[in-house]
Image (spheres, coloured by chain):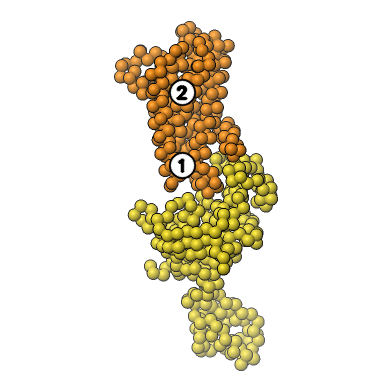
């Protein structure tokens, strides 16, 4: 598997305080990788070390390709217009003004508006367009949808997906669990400067050892039974509901019982731990 | 080179859109020039001999100390420098663009004063106009360098206003722009020698300025360049 970003034993100190304690991870070419974590976990510091705007104290960072960066807090001169800003960065990168990028990000709609008058969404789109000026292989996005309304968020997600389809590698930091679940191939969870988890969202939620709930609606009422793999069931809005920590066995047991009773299954729902709950659990672990 | 020139022209345009800069580069200096020109030349006809020089020194001091640092504070104290770093724009570009833009703006203001004063107030032109503009450029470069240092070291506009005024007000009162320095108490007259405006006025009002008078300006310039370069390299390594 081709690797786009390799981070090995990254240590960063601010004065006497160590904020990154030797984290290591790699991002594969063409994947979207998210860094998650509470405020102060070290997400932005990690990204800034990778971007090269902050020097790390120990460890190595290898980038296999050109990078484009959209910062979490970025700004431009208040009275520069969107098009002037785009042109300025294009010229310094010796890149032509890509009309396609300007159209895709809707920048032509506000090209003559001054930066201070742009909405948060327009600013984000402009900064993302600027990040793509040098046709980067790797795109680093720090909280790309923070402060955006739903429409802006959906629009930006669409653009990020297009970038992935174009073969770009994307490393992003986010607080938005829905964003991470829908966009990202893999996630890394930072906790107090350490990497507490790395894998897919499904692996993360699947590794949850807590309780899941099974909701079953049947044609005939479900009798009260003692179940081996789950709690005794109770009725919740027409659904027979059980709680279990052994989801596969409990499901099998319930379905077998249904068949034995010749009862028809009308609906079944499983409520498992969400990414958000899993994150909270990881944050609590070890505290 | 294309990117650099585009940046300089763009900065010049941005300065024209910035009210704070327009006020300090053009509006106040030119209004003050008209106001003082009217009053001083009526009550003291001798003021016509040095009106161009004194009002030019006022305009440059005001523009360089109060105006030039504004875009630099915006650029280097906030997140713009990060955008420059990750966007492939060298960190020194902001300073150089501002420097050139400020030079052009303040030279335009100086030219307006130079051209309007004889027509409106019957002010006396400098004896040797060509060397005059050479000396003026030296003074301008020195003052802009000090303005750049203010813009690089001060982190907010409110603090900038305070520090800039601490330089600008004494320059007004102690350099000889408003009244002859020999009317001042000796202590204040000596304090005046620590200000570029004092030496600037002395050089611009003389038809044959002494080389020694340029040394303080050279010293101010060198100190400002060293301080500015140190700060820029720290910002770049941050």
What residue appears at the point 45 percent right and 51 percent down from the top-left corner? A54
Chain where mark 1 sits: B
Q: Nearer the viewer, mark 1 or mark 2?
A: 2
Q: Position of residue A188 (x, y in %)?
A: 50, 65
Circle 2 Cα neighbour tier, 10 Å, few/some/many (<14 / 14–19 / ≥20):
many
Distance CA(mark 1)–CA(mark 2): 27 Å
What residue appears at the point 34 percent right and 15 percent down from the top-left corner? B184
Looking at the image, which is closer to me, A50 or A249?
Answer: A50
Q: How many marks?
A: 2
Q: Secondary structure at mark 1?
A: helix
What residue appears at the point 38 percent right and 67 percent down from the top-left corner? A287
Q: Which residue is mark 2?
A: B139
What residue appears at the point 62 percent right and 81 percent down from the top-left corner? A217
Looking at the image, which is closer to me, A23 or A203?
Answer: A23
Q: Position of residue B208 (x, y in %)?
A: 44, 12
Q: Quadrant of residue B188?
A: top left
Q: Secondary structure at mark 2?
A: helix
* Colour of the chain lettered B: orange
In the picture, one chain is yellow; tell me its letter: A
Circle 1 Cα neighbour tier, 10 Å, few/some/many (<14 / 14–19 / ≥20):
some
Q: Is residue A135 above or below residue B120?
A: below
Looking at the image, which is closer to me, B144 or A96?
Answer: A96
Q: Is residue B1 above or below residue B198?
A: below
Using the rendered image of the protein, determine whether residue B32 is visible from the camera's viewpoint: no
Point out the residue furthest to the top here. B45
Q: Which residue is mark 1?
A: B77
Q: Position of residue A106 (x, y in %)?
A: 67, 49
Point out the residue furthest to the bottom here. A260
Q: Position of residue A150 (x, y in %)?
A: 61, 57
Chain where mark 2 sits: B
Q: Are marks 1 and 2 on the same chain?
A: yes
């Amino acid at each position: 598997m081709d690797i786009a970003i390799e981070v090995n034993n990254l240590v960063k100190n601010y004065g006497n305080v160590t904020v990154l304690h030797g984290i290591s991870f790699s991002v594969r070419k063409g994947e979207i990788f998210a860094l998650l974590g509470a405020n102060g976990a070290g997400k932005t510091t990690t990204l800034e070390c990778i971007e090269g705007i902050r020097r790390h104290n120990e460890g190595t960072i290898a980038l296999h390709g050109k990078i484009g960066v959209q910062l979490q807090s970025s700004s431009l001169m208040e009275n520069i217009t969107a098009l002037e800003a785009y042109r300025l960065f294009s010229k310094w990168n010796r890149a032509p003004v890509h009309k396609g990028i300007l159209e895709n990000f809707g920048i032509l709609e506000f090209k003559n508006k001054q930066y201070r008058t742009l909405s948060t969404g327009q600013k984000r789109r402009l900064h993302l367009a600027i990040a793509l000026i040098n046709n980067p292989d790797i795109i680093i996005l720090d909280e790309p949808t923070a402060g955006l309304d739903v429409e802006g968020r959906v629009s930006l997600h669409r653009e990020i997906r297009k970038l992935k389809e174009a073969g770009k590698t994307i490393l992003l930091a986010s607080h938005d669990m829905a964003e991470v679940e829908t966009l990202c191939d893999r996630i890394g969870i930072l906790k107090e400067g350490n990497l507490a988890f790395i894998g897919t969202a499904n692996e993360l939620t699947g590794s949850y050892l807590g309780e899941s709930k099974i909701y079953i609606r049947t044609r005939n009422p479900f009798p009260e039974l003692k179940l081996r793999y789950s709690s005794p069931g109770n009725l919740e809005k027409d659904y027979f509901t059980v709680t279990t920590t052994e989801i596969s066995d409990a499901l099998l047991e319930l379905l077998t019982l249904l068949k034995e009773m010749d009862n028809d299954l009308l609906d079944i729902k499983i409520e498992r731990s969400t990414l958000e709950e899993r994150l909270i659990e990881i944050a609590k672990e070890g505290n | 080179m294309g990117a650099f020139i585009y940046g300089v022209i763009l900065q010049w345009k941005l300065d024209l859109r910035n009210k704070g800069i327009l006020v300090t580069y053009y509006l106040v200096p030119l209004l003050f020039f008209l106001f003082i020109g009217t009053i001083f030349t009526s009550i003291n006809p001798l003021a016509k001999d040095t009106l161009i020089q004194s009002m030019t020194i006022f305009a440059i001091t005001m523009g360089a100390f109060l105006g030039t640092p504004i875009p630099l504070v915006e650029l280097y104290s906030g997140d713009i420098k990060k955008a420059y770093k990750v966007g492939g724009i060298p960190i020194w570009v902001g300073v150089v663009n501002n420097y050139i833009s400020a030079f052009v703006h303040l030279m335009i203001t100086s030219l307006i004063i130079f051209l309007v004063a004889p027509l409106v107030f019957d002010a006396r032109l400098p004896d040797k106009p060509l060397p005059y503009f050479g000396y003026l450029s030296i003074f301008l470069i020195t003052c802009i360098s000090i303005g750049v240092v203010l813009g690089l070291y001060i982190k907010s506009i409110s603090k900038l206003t305070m520090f800039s005024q601490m330089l600008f007000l004494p320059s007004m009162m102690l350099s000889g722009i408003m009244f002859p320095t020999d009317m001042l108490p000796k202590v204040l007259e000596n304090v005046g020698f620590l200000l570029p405006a004092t030496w600037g006025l002395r050089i611009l009002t003389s038809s044959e300025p002494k080389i020694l008078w340029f040394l303080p300006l050279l010293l101010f310039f060198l100190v400002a360049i060293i301080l500015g370069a140190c700060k820029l390299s720290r910002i770049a390594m941050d």
